[in-house]
Image: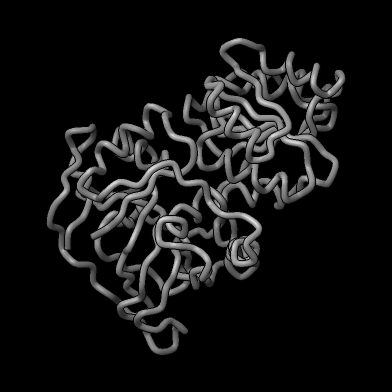
Amino acid sequence: MKAVVLEKRGKDGIRIGDFPDPARPQGNAIMRVKAAALNHADLYMRDSGKGITHELPMVLGLDGAGEIVEADPESGLKPGQRVITYPMEFCGACQYCQAGEQPWCRDLSIIGEQRHGTYGEYISARAGCFLPMPDNLDWTQAAALPVAHMTAWRMVFGRSPLRPGETVLIHGIGGGVALAALQLAILAGATALVTSGSDEKLAKAKALGAHEGINYRRDKVADRVRELTHGRGVDMVIDNVGEATWGESLRAAAWGGRIMVCGATTGGHPSADLQRVFVRQLQIIGSTAANLDQYRALLRVVAAGRIEPVIDSVYAMDDAVEALDRLEQARQFGKIVLTIP
């Protein structure tokens, strides 16, 4: 098959060409990939991969949508069925899987990180990693949905859900998770404040329903948040940026506020500012992708036409290196998607 293959670290380590077709062991299904979306995890794998158990060469890509080619009869999947990926292989037997918390599985294997991903013509994964694709999405929309919207769903509606009438601050609008969080915050009946260094992105976010945008190149985010909330601060902060935004996140939160952390693209070791955490009784909640029940709830909302992914741009698989450059330079507003020929 043809695939985007990481052979060594760095931009010159990506090769687009032939790669062995995946095998299908018992319990697995094979999907013919139609489209696959980019994530910051692809850049991390390209440039470092530190802390993630894997072997090179490997096929990149976490998100994908396509058609089932082969599956066990008892899997419930049928050849030709349109499906969307759940990007985490889980054992189904450990205490966490039995409790419905697949992201905590002790045998978790993330597609595109610990094992081959979606940037190829075919992918083999456990049958539980393929769910029926909403009929109202095309291939690019479906491929753009999983990681960003699952991650946002777990933060907005998960352990400490955002409630109607609350206010949320979302950093880095334009990225997939941030835009998904904006959509879901509006769905929850909350007021959303968003940040960016681009006035153009802020204007687009307001057109999507953001209450106000804050340009962090001109304004101190926390100061502007206090102005907009009449000194109170926000009930929830969604931060997948890390070191560059952490201090502002803590200062922008109201007493008893929640800081939802799902990434650290600018670094993972900011000042803890523990005095502020305990004096203001802030909750800091780490979060990754959704469990299967949460994912199915998301898919029902999408199937009902209440939200759809925002697409920034679509590239052919042969242009994957250029697409990754666009992601690295933070030029996107929405998801960047590869079409797989």
74 vs 326, nearest the viewer: 326
> In this view, which residue lies farthest toward the left?
18
Q: Is residue 232 left or right of residue 162?
A: right
> In this view, which residue lies farthest toward the bottom?
73
Residue name at image x 23 percent, y 35 percent: 9
Q: Position of residue 89 (x, y in %)?
A: 44, 63
Residue name at image x 72 percent, y 17 percent: 222
Q: Position of residue 67 (x, y in %)?
A: 36, 72
The N terminus - image quarter? bottom left
Q: Is residue 11 left or right of residue 64?
A: left
Q: How many marks?
A: 0
Residue name at image x 66 percent, y 12 percent: 220
Residue 4 lies, with reference to residue 274, above or below; the image says below
Is residue 23 in view from this perspective?
yes
Q: Position of residue 340 (x, y in %)?
A: 27, 58
Q: Is residue 171 left or right of residue 341?
A: right
Residue name at image x 22 percent, y 33 percent: 11
The C terminus - image quarter? bottom left
Residue 69 lies, with reference to residue 330, above or below; the image says below
169 vs 56, nearest the viewer: 169
281 vs 93, nearest the viewer: 281
Q: Position of residue 293 (x, y in %)?
A: 63, 66
Q: Quadrant of residue 339?
A: bottom left
Is residue 294 in view from this perspective?
no
Residue 319 lies, with reference to residue 119, above or below; the image says above
The figure's colour scheme reads one colour
